[in-house]
Image (cartoon, rainbow, N blue to C red):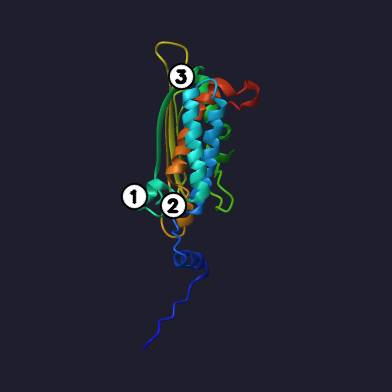
């Protein structure tokens, strides 16, 4: 009788031990997404705590959602993925569209955004943005420990002073990033309507597979919140002597 010998790789020891003990391994999130989930949960919960007395209902929702994201990242299990039988999340394209009113003059709002190095002040998913020559800039994502650094260069492709800014990552960048922000005076009062479109596309192929996993639904929610933070930052948070203008 022929005997079959199975050699277990080190990373499979715990899995097979759990199976032998009758324990189910229900972890269905990879570590990059778990890190992002915890980070997003902490940020969302903190935002809720700051608004607890100003907007209690909204604050409670944010705190609850933040707690869920933290727990999701800590235990490494997403019930939604389990229900969908999706054990490893696939990278997704991040497409953000948002519109809001800022109670500041149009030229002031435009001038602030035109200086891309201001963006990390309210976009927590960005570590920093460096201004280069010829309308170029270098962008750095803020990522969990253990995840490779992601940076790329972008170039302004359209600039209509006080009206619109458009940018796009340069050819050869590890990820594709593009955005467009339009600024318009509101009709019935003092202020500026801001329309924002931002896109991230993860790298293709096996070389960028690990980086691509960062671009998941949790990261998308973080970017959405960051865009909305712009209104809060401009209307409430910033002091004019700490902000860079053109």
Looking at the image, which residue is at 38% across and 46% down?
80
Q: Pick out the residue farthest to the front.
A: 21
Q: Position of residue 157 (x, y in %)?
A: 44, 36
Foreground label between 1 and 2 = 1
* Circles 3, 1 touching at the beta carbon (< 8 Å): no
Work out how far the residue at label 3 is from the one at label 1, CA to CA, in angstroms: 42 Å
Work out how far the residue at label 1 is from the one at label 2, CA to CA, in angstroms: 25 Å
Q: Which residue is mark 3?
A: 192
Q: Pick out the residue farthest to the right.
A: 241
Q: Pick out the residue farthest to the bottom.
A: 1
Seen from the viewer's position, the closer of residues 184 and 94 is 94
Work out how far the residue at label 3 is from the one at label 2, CA to CA, in angstroms: 35 Å
Looking at the image, which residue is at 43% across and 48% down?
78
* Circles 3, 2 touching at the beta carbon (< 8 Å): no
Q: Pick out the residue farthest to the left.
A: 84
Q: Is residue 153 visible?
A: no
Of callouts 3 and 1, which one flags the residue occurring earlier in the amino acid sequence? 1
Q: Which residue is mark 2?
A: 203
Q: Which residue is mark 1?
A: 84
Looking at the image, which residue is at 52% across and 34% down?
44
Q: Is residue 39 left or right of residue 28?
A: right
Q: Residues within 10 Å of mark 2 (few under 14, many from 20)?
A: some
Of callouts 1 and 2, which one flags the residue occurring earlier in the amino acid sequence? 1
């Amino acid at each position: 009788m022929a005997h079959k010998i199975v050699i277990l790789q080190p990373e499979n020891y715990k899995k097979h031990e759990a199976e032998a003990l009758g324990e189910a391994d229900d972890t269905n999130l990879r570590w990059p997404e778990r890190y992002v989930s915890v980070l997003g949960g902490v940020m969302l919960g903190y935002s809720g705590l700051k608004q607890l007395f100003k907007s209690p209902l909204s604050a409670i929702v944010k705190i609850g959602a933040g707690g869920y994201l933290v727990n999701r990242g800590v235990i490494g299990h997403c019930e939604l993925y389990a229900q969908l039988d999706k054990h490893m999340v696939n990278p997704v394209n991040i497409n953000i569209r948002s519109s809001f009113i800022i109670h500041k003059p149009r030229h002031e709002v435009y001038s602030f955004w035109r200086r891309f190095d201001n963006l990390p002040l309210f976009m927590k998913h960005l570590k920093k943005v460096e201004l280069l020559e010829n309308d170029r800039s270098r962008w750095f994502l803020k990522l969990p420990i253990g995840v490779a650094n992601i940076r790329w260069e972008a170039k302004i492709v359209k600039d209509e002073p006080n009206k619109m800014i458009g940018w796009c990552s340069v050819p050869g960048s590890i990820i594709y990033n593009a955005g467009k922000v339009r600024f318009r005076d509101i009709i019935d009062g003092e202020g500026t309507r801001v329309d924002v479109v931002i896109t991230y596309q993860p790298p293709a192929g096996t070389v960028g597979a690990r980086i691509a996993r960062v671009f998941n639904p949790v990261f998308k929610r973080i970017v959405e919140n960051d865009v909305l933070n712009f209104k809060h930052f401009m209307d409430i948070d910033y002091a004019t002597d700490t902000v860079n203008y053109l």
